[in-house]
Amino acid sequence: MLILSIYVFKFMDKKVTYNYVENSLLKSLNLIKELTESEIFIKNTIEASDLIIDSITNNNCIFLAGNGGSAAHSQHFAAELICRFNFDRNPLPALALTTDSSVITAISNDYGYENIFERQISGLSKKGDVFIGLTTSGTSKNIIKAFKRAKILKLKTIAICGGNGIPKSDFIPDVEISIPSKVTSLIQEMHGITTHLICDIVEKTIFSEIK
């Protein structure tokens, strides 16, 4: 069956292949257009940026976490704050809680995978920090538990999620940026755009480059 599938794909009509790629791009384009026209998305993106700016200017830190593709976005986001986004400037304090394999495996082994971010928040954060949780489903247990711990410790919370949002029965973040889709790949694409928007606003505002 696998050999047959490869054979069919290899000799697929080029027009069909072209149309497939074109339609895939149009799905992304249509979702970007929907976000461009969404007052809620734009408002929440600005509000999230303001929370981060206020935290950093008060000598606090930004913590980020996610699973799978969202872990990659967390690390990407943190790297752009620590290093640079558009121009050379001083580093901004940010830490992705997805990178220390010893900490993650120790907590998973001793306390369970659902506690890997909550326990790091407990040990590393202080009042006034920000915790950003990325979850396409909105229901990742380790992200929800980290949000709850962050609230107890008086951190500000930002959720970047998919069309389902964060269930209100689980947690209500200070800011929720939801992407109006249930397709994981499209949600993740828009999460990349969203985090770039926030990095751009934060960097230019803090270093007085905003236009």
Image (tube, rainbow, N blue to C red):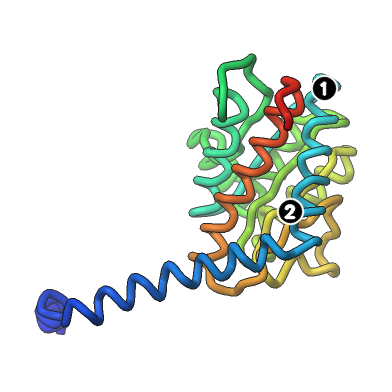
Q: Is residue 208 above or below residue 135?
A: above
Q: Residues within 10 Å of mark 1 (few under 14, many from 20)?
A: few
Q: From the top left corner, tell me how far across and down residue 74 is, in percent.
A: 58, 43
Q: How many marks?
A: 2
Q: Which residue corresponds to mark 1?
A: 57
Question: Looking at the rendering, in which quadrant would you find the N terminus?
Answer: bottom left
Q: Is residue 86 visible?
A: yes
Q: Secondary structure at mark 2?
A: strand
Compared across the picture, whether 193 is left or right of 168 comes to left
In the rendered image, the residue lying farthest to the front is: 211
Return the mark for residue 80.
none
Residue 121 rendering spot, x and y as whole percentages: 73, 37
In the figure, is residue 128 to the left or right of 104?
right
The residue positioned 56% from the left and 22% from the top of the image is 87
Give the answer, above or below, for where 54 lies relative to 169: above
Residue occupied by mark 2: 159
Amino acid at dot 2: Ala
- Residue 63, by quadrant, is top right
Of the pair 156 and 46, the residue shown nearer to us: 46
Q: Quadrant of the C terminus?
A: top right
In the image, 110 versus 169, the foreground residue is 169
Residue for point 27% across, 74% down: 18
Mark closer to the chain start, 1 or 2: 1
